[in-house]
């Protein structure tokens, strides 16, 4: 069961932490994909980016539930 994190008396949902961590990870992965030229092979970049973000949020959230 997930519990809220206490940050100086303010309860923060684990989902918010996962959303922020996944956003940072997506920025890093987008930079790597752009630097390597992998985006040339992707048809619709915004669709790919949002899908990558959702997958990263799901992975992070599943890791916090363990």
Image (cartoon, rainbow, N blue to C red):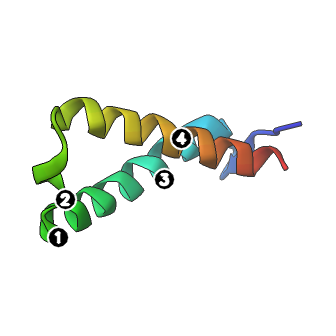
Residue 65 percent location from the top left of the image: 80, 44
Which callout, 4 or 2, points at the residue further toward the start of the chain?
2
What residue is shown with label 1? 36
Labels 4 & 1 near each other (Cβ < 8 A): no
Please name whichever residue, 1 or 39, is drawn nearer the observer in this view of the structure. Answer: 39
Q: Is residue 37 above or below residue 42?
A: below
Question: How far apart, in angstroms, are the residues tagged by discs 1 and 3?
Answer: 23 Å
Give the residue at mark 2: 38
Q: Earlier in the sequence, mark 1 or mark 3?
A: 3
Q: Nearer the viewer, mark 3 or mark 2?
A: 2
Residue at disc 3, secondary structure: helix
* Residue under label 4: 57
Say what secondary structure mark 1 lies in: helix
User: Alpha-carbon distance for marks 4 and 1?
Assistant: 24 Å
- Tell me how far mark 3 sits from mark 4, CA to CA: 8 Å
Dot 1 crowding, Cα within 10 Å, few <14, some 14–19, many 20+:
few
Nearer mark to the viewer, of 4 and 2 = 2
Dot 3 or dot 2: first in sequence order is: 3
Q: Would you identify the image quadrant in which residue 47 lies?
A: top left
Q: Give the camera-side residue of 7 and 63.
A: 63
């Amino acid at each position: 069961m997930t519990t809220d994190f206490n940050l100086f008396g303010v309860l923060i949902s684990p989902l918010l932490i996962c959303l922020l961590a996944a956003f940072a990870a997506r920025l890093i992965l987008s930079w790597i994909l752009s630097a390597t030229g992998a985006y040339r092979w992707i048809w619709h970049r915004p669709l790919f980016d949002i899908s990558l973000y959702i997958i990263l949020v799901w992975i992070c959230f599943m890791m916090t539930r363990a």
